[in-house]
Image (cartoon, helix red, strand yellow):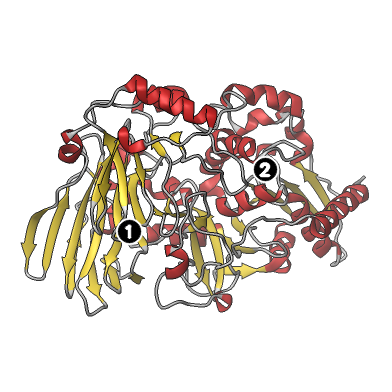
Amino acid sequence: MKDNLINSYHISNLVMSVEEPIRKTGQKIMPRHISKINQPQGYNIYPYYSLGDQKIFDGYSSLCDYIIEQKTVVIDGYVGVLWNRLITSLTEELTSRQLSVNIIDTSSFFKSEVALDAMIAPFLGAADSVWGRKTTLTLSDYFDTAALNEVKKDSTADINMVIGCGASLANWNASLIYVDLPKNELQHRMSAGSICNLGMSQPGGQMEMYKRFYFVDWEVLNQHKKELINTIDVFVDAQWEEEVNWAYGKDIRDGLTKMSSGVFRTRPWFAPGAWGGQWMKDHMPQLDRNEVNYAWSFELIVPENGIVFESDGWLLEVSFDVLMFTHFENVLGRHAVQFGHEFPIRFDFLDTFNGGNLSIQCHPNLKYIQQEFGERLTQDETYYILDCKENATVYLGFQEDIDATEFREALENSNLNNEEIDIEKYVQVHQAKKHDLFLIPNETVHSAGAQNLVLEISATPYIFTFKMYDWVRLDLNRKPRPINIDHAFKNLNFDRKGDKVQQELISKPSVLFQQEDLVCYHLPTHQDHFYDVHRLEFDKEIEVQTENVCHVLMLVEGTAITVESADGTLITFPFAETFVIPAGAGSYKMINQGTERAKVIKAFLK
């Protein structure tokens, strides 16, 4: 039986590598070693945090050295990992050393797919809906746990391993190896059809798969990871096709401890879109120029960002949530009780340079997003104009004479008959200028027009966009994007119109204080926003106190700044890179590395 199992994995592995691409994207995978990275003068898409020497190891061979020392291991991990390939690689390496291996694959203990579909259905919403509801299930609900708990080690085998999502549920007393996968690579694999949802044997449509990942699979696996985080003996990064990098759990946790009181940057990732532009492609030289456009940069959308560690040039990525699971109090300071393990601020770019307008849209109010989708926070946003052309605009708020019934009829007619709308009859359009801040609390009609690079400074939720009008265009796959008029009209605030828009939804900067070289401007946010914004302008060097509050920052004018935290961490950030100062840092210095005055945006919790 053992030989048959190994052979079946080997065949599966060969079919996948020969016949099917693993990932579908124009973007290159992050290199395993920094020697393969072309270091730019400016914006770097591969930031990393050094752990010191001999902390990260490469390859299956060294990982198997560790497994042989342990003799028995539990190998748990995330959905989207190519488990068949991982098992094949480990088996081939171990058997090449003349060792017998007993492999228990957790996929054999999933409940039937029919049972899983029925169990998950209440959290997926309508079949044609983009959204579901955050699940209340746990990972053990996916398994026949009684059968999994009965699995025993083979005393005659040299190596025993239980492997796959949920392996720790077998309750073996053994070393725990956790295999992780970055969310961007998970989605590139999803697009290629090379992975399935948790417990499934075949991939589905991309919208259906992503909905199930977001509302169900990621929820149960994130909770499972949180429960394991302090007992993981080895972290494995499995984003590459042929090899892995790995590190001891203690060294990763030590790195997280240091990071939680210093300064750090998450790894950004990028995605094209129907309205995407060319600014990022022109200003970020490491991006693949063959991509049609770049619409989004996930600068700090923490449910989908990772943190990259480095040692001896080797790189290893872990999900951002491991920092929050271990050190949320250090990161959030006096707001830790309010937000718990959920990092509440989002930074991302919307690039419409030589692209198109975003859809006319709104976001749900807090009660609606909690009741309908199970989220804790709602999607309050702001648009900070990092760069723009002279003719750039932002759509925001209603015209004074807005008629809700007429507006809805126009939208529904457009959607039904594929007809354009004179949207400015209903929605105000405003000229956009560099450093403007447009305020978009939930329930507000809005859109970013073409010719902008928008820095969204927002609450963390990011997929709850109710599109009402999408300019009668198709997405990059030549299909219409979903329109959500009914959801929108359950949330739109029609009192945000006329002069109120200028008064309440366009921030009016004022000098908060001046001292020596520094001028601090306050860019007030809306009363519904739980975060605020300052802009710090200086020529040489300034020192900032955190006052037990987390700061999210970006150099929005200038060449580069070097940031030195109180613990001695020293990192240089060029123009447009997002970085985080945890509340626990206490204080930090910013040193201007350019000849022009530095302007730094600082977002923080009220």
Q: Callout 2 environment at 10 Å: few (<14), some (14 to 19), or many (20+)?
A: many
- In the displayed structure, would residue 37 be above or below residue 427? below
Residue 457 versus residue 329: which sits nearer the camera?
Answer: 457
Q: Amino acid at mark 2?
A: Cys
Q: CA–CA distance between discs 2 and 1?
A: 32 Å
Question: Mark 2 touching mark 1, by CB under 8 A?
Answer: no
Residue designated by label 1: 261
Residue 322 versus residue 210: which sits nearer the camera?
Answer: 210
Left or right of residue 69: residue 434: left
- In the displayed structure, would residue 236 be above or below residue 226? below
Q: Position of residue 311 (x, y in %)?
A: 52, 72
Q: Amino acid at mark 1?
A: Ser
Q: Position of residue 187 (x, y in %)?
A: 61, 49
At 50% from the left and 57% from the top, the residue drawn is 270
At 84% from the left and 48% from the top, the residue drawn is 155
Residue 165 is marked as 2
Q: Which quarter of the picture shows residue 117?
A: top right
- In the displayed structure, would residue 502 be above or below residue 57? above
Q: Secondary structure at mark 2?
A: loop
At 71% from the left and 30% from the top, the residue drawn is 145
